[in-house]
Image (cartoon, rainbow, N blue to C red):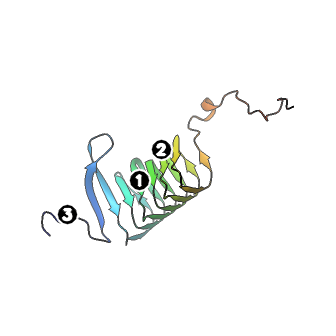
Amino acid sequence: MTKDQKETSPGAFSGTSGSGSSGSSKDSTIISKSILIKGEIAGEEDLTIQGRVEGTMTLKNNHATVGPSGHLIGDLHGKLISVEGEVQGNLFAEEKIHLKSSAVVEGDMKAPVISLQEGAKFKGRIDMDTGGARQRSSFRPSGSPGSKHS
């Protein structure tokens, strides 16, 4: 392979270096299209799924991406989660979950910030309560007991 042919061959499980959101160099791994992984995945680097993963993924301090051809069956825990492909399981992010327009998610999502682009398909519950009782206020919807309706 020549210096100009650094592209990962189809079906490869490759680790590459890239720049993280903080501007520092950070390791990143890609699970490419023809790869199937069954079991638990845990790590301390960013991960992109373009293949199929069946099992729990734990990347608590990192960015997890389910790419356009990616399919995840199982729960995903990460700092930031982006979905372009399909997920059948729950998503838990420390900072943000972002579903792009091609995303199909069936499962619950929990994160302080959750965004869905127009066209994203989602079936499940959303929980953005990060502060517990601290976030609760005396606000009562208009249909609450004690309110008057005409």
* Front position in the image: 37 or 145: 145
Which residue in the protein does label 2 denote? 96
Spatial CA span between label 2 and label 1:
11 Å
**Residue 25: mark in rendering:** none
Q: Position of residue 72 (x, y in %)?
A: 48, 63
Q: Relative to the observer, which residue lies in front, 16 or 5?
A: 5
Q: Position of residue 21 (x, y in %)?
A: 33, 42
Query: With 78 as the anchor, is 121 left or right in this view?
Result: right
Q: Residue at x 74, y 33 (%)?
A: 141
Residue beneath disc 1: 64
**Could you tell which of marks 1 and 3 lies nearer the N-terminus?**
3
Report the amino acid beneath label 3.
Lys
Q: Secondary structure at mark 3?
A: loop
Image position of 13 (left or right of 81): left
* Above-or-below relation of 136 to 43: above
Q: Earlier in the sequence, mark 2 or mark 1?
A: 1
